[in-house]
Image: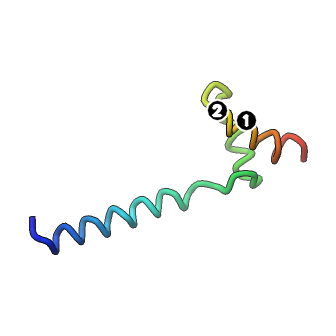
Amino acid sequence: MSVVNKVIVSIAAVFFVISISACSPEVGSDSWCMDMKEKPKGDWTSNDAKSFAQNCFFK
C-alpha cells in the first residue's frame, strides 16, 4: 500500500469517526434524556445514571 493510499484511508477513517460522534445528542439535552428513558436501565453506566438524575429527573 502506497503512502498516498495510507493517507487517504486515514483521512476517511477520521471523517467516519467524526460523523458517527456528531449523531450523539449532548448529555443533558432533551433528546439525550428521551434516549435514556428508552434505553434499558441495565445498560446504563453509573455516569449515565448520575447525569440523568442531574439533568433529566430534577427538571
Mark 1 or 2 closer to N-term?
A: 2
Q: Kindly identify the residue that appears in the image at 54 percent across and 61 percent down.
A: 22
| Amino acid beneath label 1 | Ala
Colouring used for the render: rainbow
Indicate left or right for 39 with 18 as reference. right
Percent of width and height locating residue 3: 14, 72
Compare residues 46 and 29 and report the one nearer the observer.
46
Q: Kindly identify the residue that appears in the image at 81 percent across and 47 percent down.
A: 55
Residue ranking furthest to the left: 1
Q: How many residues crowd around disc 1 within 10 Å: few (fewer than 14), some, or many (20 or more)?
A: some
Residue ranking furthest to the top: 42
Indicate whether 44 appears above or below 6. above
Indicate whether 54 appears above or below 30. above
Residue ranking furthest to the right: 59
| Amino acid beneath label 2 | Trp
Percent of width and height locating residue 23: 55, 58
Number of numbered markers:
2
Is there CB contact under 8 Å for labels 1 and 2?
yes
Circle 1 is placed at which residue position?
A: 49
Indicate left or right for 17 with 32 as reference. left
Using the rendered view, name the quadrant where residue 26 is placed.
bottom right
Indicate whether 40 appears above or below 48. above
Percent of width and height locating residue 51: 75, 43
The image's mark for residue 14 is none
Indicate left or right for 9 with 56 as reference. left
Kind of element beneath mark 2: loop
Circle 2 is placed at which residue position?
A: 44
Using the rendered view, name the quadrant where residue 42 is placed.
top right
Kind of element beneath mark 1: helix
